[in-house]
Image (cartoon, rainbow, N blue to C red):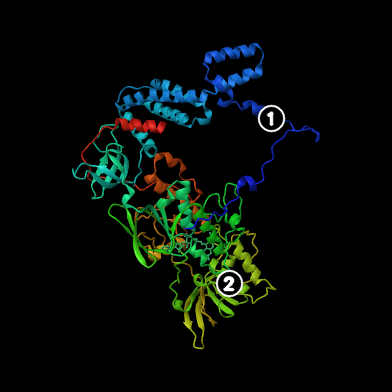
């Protein structure tokens, strides 16, 4: 990909107005500003650099000097000297922290051995950490955390008996689980089993952390339980490279393959690489179109985003509704409130270039095969040739737009789906029947009317008068406003005819030429809007016919189908996901079944991002909704493979109310075969505690 740097967000320093510096003024306006502030700041600017040699002097010399300065009443110099003396506090805090560790370690050893340790024994360590916290309050997180843990431990020790000891070690083990171990559940590893002297290392997957088994002594745990690729369950007694290590990526092309470079694919890839630090060279986006944002580029020319873009970053904690990466704004980049498809695709392409994403254009994913070792072979067709790419994870982001649904309508072959329309104005003829009255149908209606065509909309629900709490289950304000515009008296073209509630039964070729669209009137559902609604009722629709009676509308042109999308999962990804039954309503019916982290329940290692994601009753069908899940997916992938040091970066991208997180699925079923070796992992538990405390 060609790299082109495009401004995606304002350079804050230059674009945002600065908050004015507060100046203290006397009542009279002509008084100069109070300037003592500058002096006070200058006084505090005492660092190692400007105290120079005196910094290295022993404390007693410095104290003597200080006393002398005070005697001489040179308070300014005394203040500077004392500040320089105190500059050593952060270093002393470090010493105190190390002392805390030195005092704590043997106590933990004794504890793990079942030895007698009382609350009072922790006093020294506690005091050391307390000092560390006080002496360097700017960097006290570690000491504060240690203090909290010691307090917890002491509470448990107070009520200690034989069983409690086990509980102390176990609960502490649990608490350190995510922080102390090098790998998470699901990590692909190799273990030194020694079963085969030729090849002692065997590949498998971590299935449990801090594993213990029946009959083991209290406190006895091992860091990992691992399922080898031949199905055998073993455990790794040590969390060390000589015993267990990540499988090398030598046989992999990349760590993550993202299928599709649309809004979801680009957004999730940015989250993986920028927010979570994965090497962009290890995340590959496969896009069958010839440019990033291919679906958006295929939008009808007149179509616009209905969710408004506005650049409020820097002023509020939220982002442009249509942004897929933090610190970017389509409104700012494009200077458009309702971007066209092409504009938005340009924003995505700029983002991909800016984040140095590895996007392979013209590469169609044909199938994804899970291998015995847990990796995936992604079969692609690019440039007329077939190829295979091997990866640890697959993120499915192939969207919906390119997989339209005809709603199983008999005669759909006589129609044109709205996703295939290049331009509403460019459609032949001066009239059209639109089947479907939700967002796409009303958008088609508005744009056809604006192009001077006579439109008849056949809708199952009079959406123009529906009010719901979820902005994506009612017409967007932008669409409602545009509909009022084209149905208002004095509109320059023929007024659209809006007919609802109707069930369209079939489309037939008419004997006189053209087509007949045959529908039946449905019973009007009430109420469509809550009592006390402030909205002006929409009066521009035709009155409904008698329920059950038939309506035939003739058109000379192929009717326009605005019947939604089947989506890529249902169309080509069924092998990878189980689908819900059709009993739910709207997007929930037939939705792919996912874990709380949007991982396929059918194929672990495959994640779904984009508008098809459903969690419980929540459907993430718009950009501002589904972007909240990027962090969840990136987090899940990282929890499996990332080193603990990077984990603080988790869940930073687009966390909102929909971004719930409940942990990964549990480990193996009970009663499965276990390798017969058991080791008391004293160092490990102690190490775990210490790592946690550190
Ligand atoms: C009429 C209409 C108006 C909309 N207006 C809004 C709006 O105002 N605000 C909003 O938030 N959302 C809106 N949406 C929804 C929004 O467009 C979609 O939610 C969004 O495009 C989904 O992004 P995606 O990346 O999942 O899918 P896409 O943008 O469709 O991206 C999927 C990508 O995958 C590629 N692909 C597909 N199959 C394969 C394959 N087998 N191999 C390789 N690549 C493949 C495609 O070429 C495409 O580039 C609208 C949708 C429609 C249809």
The residue pinned by badge 1 equals 37
Q: Residue at x 31, y 30 (%)?
A: 683
Q: Is residue 22 left or right of residue 513?
A: right
Residue 81, position in %: x, y?
59, 19
Where is residue 555, by image quadrant? Answer: bottom right
Q: Residue at x 50, y 82 (%)?
A: 515
Between disc 2 and disc 1, the foreground one is 1
Q: Is residue 214 left or right of residue 158?
A: left
Q: Is residue 644 above or below residue 135?
A: below
| Distance in Å between CA atoms under marks 2 and 1 | 64 Å
Residue 363, position in %: x, y?
41, 63
| Mark earlier in primary sequence (2, 1) | 1
Q: Is residue 207 left or right of residue 27?
A: left
Mark 2 and 1 residues: CB-CB less than 8 Å, in contact?
A: no
User: Could you tell me which quadrant the C terminus lies in?
Assistant: top left
Q: Residue at x 55, y 24 (%)?
A: 87
Count residues near mark 2 (Cα–Cα under 10 Å), then give few for <14, some for 14-19, many for 20+: many
Of residues 501 and 496, the one nearer the viewer is: 496
Q: Secondary structure at mark 1?
A: helix
Of residues 302 and 588, the one nearer the viewer is: 302
Q: Farthest residue in the bottom direction?
A: 512
Answer whether residue 594 is visible to the viewer in this image: no
The residue pinned by badge 2 equals 445
Where is residue 323, by image quadrant? Answer: bottom right
């Amino acid at each position: 990909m060609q790299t082109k740097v495009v401004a995606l967000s304002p350079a804050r320093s230059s674009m945002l107005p600065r908050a004015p510096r507060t100046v203290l003024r006397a009542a009279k306006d002509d008084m100069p500003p109070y300037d003592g502030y500058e002096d006070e700041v200058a006084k505090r600017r005492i660092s190692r650099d400007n105290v120079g040699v005196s910094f290295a002097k022993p404390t007693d010399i410095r104290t003597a000097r200080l006393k002398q300065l005070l005697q001489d009443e040179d308070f300014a110099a005394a203040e500077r000297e004392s500040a320089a003396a105190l500059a050593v506090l952060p270093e002393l805090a470090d010493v105190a922290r190390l002392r805390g560790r030195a005092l704590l370690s043997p106590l933990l050893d004794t504890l793990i051995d079942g030895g007698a340790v009382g609350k009072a024994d922790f006093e020294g360590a506690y005091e050391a950490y307390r000092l560390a916290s006080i002496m360097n309050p700017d960097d006290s997180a570690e000491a504060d955390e240690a203090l909290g843990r010691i307090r917890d431990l002491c509470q448990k020790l107070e009520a200690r008996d034989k069983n409690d000891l086990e509980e102390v070690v176990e609960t502490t083990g649990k608490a350190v689980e995510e922080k102390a171990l090098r790998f998470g559940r699901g990590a692909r590893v190799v273990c030194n089993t020694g079963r085969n002297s030729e090849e002692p290392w065997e590949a498998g997957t971590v299935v449990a952390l801090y594993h213990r088994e029946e009959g083991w002594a209290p406190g006895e745990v091992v860091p990992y339980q691992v399922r080898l690729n031949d199905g055998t369950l073993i455990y790794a007694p040590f969390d060390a490279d000589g015993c267990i290590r990540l499988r090398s990526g030598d046989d992999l092309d990349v760590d993550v393959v993202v299928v599709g470079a649309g809004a979801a694919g680009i957004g999730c890839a940015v989250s993986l690489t920028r927010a979570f630090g994965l090497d962009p060279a290890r995340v590959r986006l496969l896009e069958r179109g010839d440019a990033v944002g291919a679906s958006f580029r295929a939008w009808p020319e007149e179509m616009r985003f209905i969710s408004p873009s506005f650049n409020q970053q820097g002023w509020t904690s939220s982002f442009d509704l249509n942004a897929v990466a933090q610190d970017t704004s389509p409104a700012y980049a494009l200077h458009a409130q309702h971007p066209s498809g092409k504009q938005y695709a340009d924003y995505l392409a700029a983002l991909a270039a800016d984040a140095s994403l590895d996007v392979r254009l013209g590469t169609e994913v044909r199938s994804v095969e899970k291998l015995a070792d847990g990796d995936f072979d992604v079969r692609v067709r690019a440039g007329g040739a077939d190829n295979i790419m091997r990866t640890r994870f697959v993120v499915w982001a192939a969207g919906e737009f390119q997989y339209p649904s005809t709603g199983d309508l008999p005669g759909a072959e006589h129609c044109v789906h709205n996703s295939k329309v290049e331009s509403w104005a460019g459609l032949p003829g001066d009239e059209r029947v639109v089947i479907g009255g939700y967002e796409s149908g009303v958008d088609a209606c508005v744009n056809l009317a604006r192009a001077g065509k006579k439109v008849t909309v056949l809708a199952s629900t009079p959406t123009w008068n529906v009010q719901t709490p979820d902005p994506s289950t009612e017409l967007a304000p932008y669409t409602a406003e545009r509909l009022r515009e084209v149905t208002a008296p004095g509109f320059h073209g023929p007024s659209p005819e809006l007919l609802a509630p109707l069930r369209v039964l079939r489309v037939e070729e008419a004997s006189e030429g053209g087509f007949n669209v045959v529908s039946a009137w449905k019973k009007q559902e009430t109420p469509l809007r809550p009592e006390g609604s402030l909205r002006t009722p929409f009066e521009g629709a035709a009155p409904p016919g008698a329920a059950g009676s038939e309506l035939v509308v003739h058109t000379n042109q192929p009717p326009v189908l605005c019947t939604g999308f089947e989506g890529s999962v249902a169309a080509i990804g069924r092998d990878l996901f189980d689908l819900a039954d059709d009993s739910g309503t709207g997007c929930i019916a037939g939705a792919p079944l996912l874990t709380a982290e949007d991982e396929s329940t059918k194929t672990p290692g495959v994640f779904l991002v984009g508008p098809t994601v459903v969690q419980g009753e929540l459907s993430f069908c718009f950009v501002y909704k589904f972007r909240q899940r990027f962090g969840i997916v990136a987090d899940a992938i990282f929890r499996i493979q990332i080193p603990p040091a990077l984990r603080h970066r988790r869940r930073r991208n687009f966390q909102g109310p929909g971004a719930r997180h409940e942990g990964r699925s549990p480990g193996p079923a009970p009663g499965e075969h276990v390798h017969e070796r058991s080791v008391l992992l004293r160092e490990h538990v102690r190490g775990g505690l210490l790592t946690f405390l550190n």
